[in-house]
Image (spheres, helix red, strand yellow):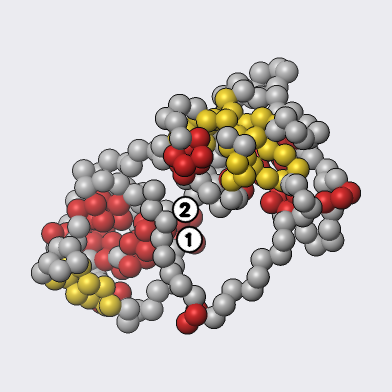
Amino acid sequence: APPPPAGGPPPHPDIEEDKINVGFKVVRSLLRNWRRGRVAALQRAGQQVDGEDPLEPDEMALLDYTLPEGLRVIVSEGATGPVQCARRVGEFDGSEAPEMLPEWAVRSVEQCFPTTDRGEPFPDTAKIGFHLVRHPSSDIKQMQQGKLNAPQILRGRKVLSYAVSKLQLEIPPHLAVAGRDEVVDYLELLCNDKVVPPETNLMTIRRFFSKTSDEITLHYRWREGGPAPLSAPSPPARYRATGQIKG
């Protein structure tokens, strides 16, 4: 990428983070033997192989899950549809017809990246534009950048980490506690003058805090009332309630 212009970063930088498609990793790991056997058979028949040669070592193989050979793989049409394929991981040898597997899975495994059933890459994650500025009540440094862009699934914690990295903040003495150097221990994020929980993503912030489809404005400030309280130990799994907040 070209270097930023003199005088500072570009006016609309992106906040990025490393992402791994866990679903693709699982599918690739489950069907690794199938792909190797299928490609070997095509090569013996003199047919062209799509994607990278799976018989050669590749960097992605280092990211594959190590799954038990006896793990059963069941492919069906929907949760209650007829079973199209039932094999153990170690039983796949490439002789299975591609029609036994979902088209998107075949295309993704063959081409070594997640694709649609037409073999096209998935579009990039939707992004949200926002402004990140100092809260008027805080004596903290002011960001010099204008509008920012980030994936809508980015959490408030990451936004605060971005501010710390750009501003090179030093923790004030009244917030400094030995062993407590997480960004949420001394910073907090606000939208519409309401403190945003650090695990809240931008999509949720826009819907429930900003309540507008336009660009949002986020404020950062030193934590009020001292460092964040220590989290209580998690209860045993059998006592833990499960649930999901739906937007």
In the depicted view, which residue is nearer to us: 20 or 111? Answer: 20
- Taking the image as shown, residue 160 lies to the left or right of residue 85, namely right
Vertical placement of 40 versus 92: above or below?
above
Vertical placement of 37 versus 245: above or below?
below
Residue at 47% x, 53% y is 20
Amino acid under label 1? Leu
Total numbered circles: 2
- Taking the image as shown, residue 95 lies to the left or right of residue 130, namely left
Helix, strand or loop at label 2? It is: loop
Image coordinates for residue 169, horizontal then vertical, percent = 79, 40
Residue at 15% x, 69% y is 80
In the depicted view, which residue is nearer to us: 112 or 104? Answer: 104
Q: Which numbered marker is on residue 63?
A: 1
Image coordinates for residue 83, horizontal then vertical, percent = 14, 71
Q: Are marks 1 and 2 in contact (CB under 8 Å)?
A: yes
Please tell me how crowded label 2 is: few (under 14), some (14-19), or many (20+) other residues with Cα within 10 Å: few
Residue at 15% x, 63% y is 77
Vertical placement of 135 versus 153: above or below?
above
Image coordinates for residue 110, horizontal then vertical, percent = 29, 53
Q: Which numbered marker is on residue 20?
A: 2
Amino acid under label 2? Ile
Residue at 85% x, 45% y is 172
Which quadrant of the structure image shows residue 191?
A: top right
**Is residue 58 visible from the viewing direction of this image?**
no
